[in-house]
Amino acid sequence: MTALPMALYDEVRAALVDAGRQDLARQLAPFRPRRALTSGQAAAVLGVASPNTVKNWLESGRFPGAYQTAGGHWRFPADEVEAAKARMEALAEQNRRGDLAPPDLDEADDGPPLL
């Protein structure tokens, strides 16, 4: 399922609502575009120095909703980046409190501990 560009989505949805077709406007919901960030923007949100760090995390499976544009540039769903930031901040707070336990080696490896 491909998301529509935000402007087109808004225009089509408004036209459906204006035409009294709220039922069709609701069916359009799965096509609502998600706000996406460039790798540089994602790096800035996450507080890392290089967009390549974010791309490395992408390659390890950290951002499953990321996609490439027609020009080959990566876009990262803003909600996934914000969730990664929240996890990083929670771990940093635990570290400040000295409340981090070593990882359980019996558990499946879910990737880098900061994400």
Image (spheres, grey):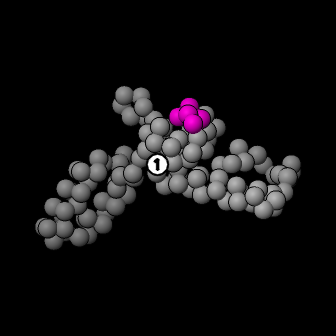
Farthest-out residue, left:
19
Q: State which region is magenta.
A: 49-53
* Left or right placement of residue 19 versus residue 38 in this view: left
Residue 77, image x, y percentages:
46, 48
The relative height of residue 92 versus residue 73 in the rendered view (above or below) is below
Q: Is residue 115 left or right of residue 21?
A: right
Circle 1 residue: 77
Q: Nearer the viewer, residue 87 or 69?
A: 87
Q: Residue at x 37, y 28 (%)?
A: 71
Q: Position of residue 97 (x, y in %)?
A: 78, 62
Q: Residue at x 72, y 48 (%)?
A: 113
Q: Can residue 65 be seen here?
A: no
Q: Disc 1 on helix, strand or loop?
A: strand
Looking at the image, which residue is at 36% across and 46% down?
2
Kindly identify the residue that appears in the image at 24 percent across and 57 percent down: 10
- Residue 20 pos. (x, y %): 16, 71
Left or right relative to 4: residue 110: right
Which one is in front, 90 or 98?
Answer: 98
Place residue 37 in its image quadrant.
Answer: top left
| Amino acid type shown at disc 1 | Pro
Please identify the dominant SS of the magenta region: helix
Q: Is residue 71 above or below residue 101?
A: above
Q: Is residue 37 left or right of residue 13?
A: right
Which of 52/106 is in front?
52
Number of marks = 1
- Judge whether residue 10 can be spotted in this image: yes
| 9, above or below 58, in the image | below
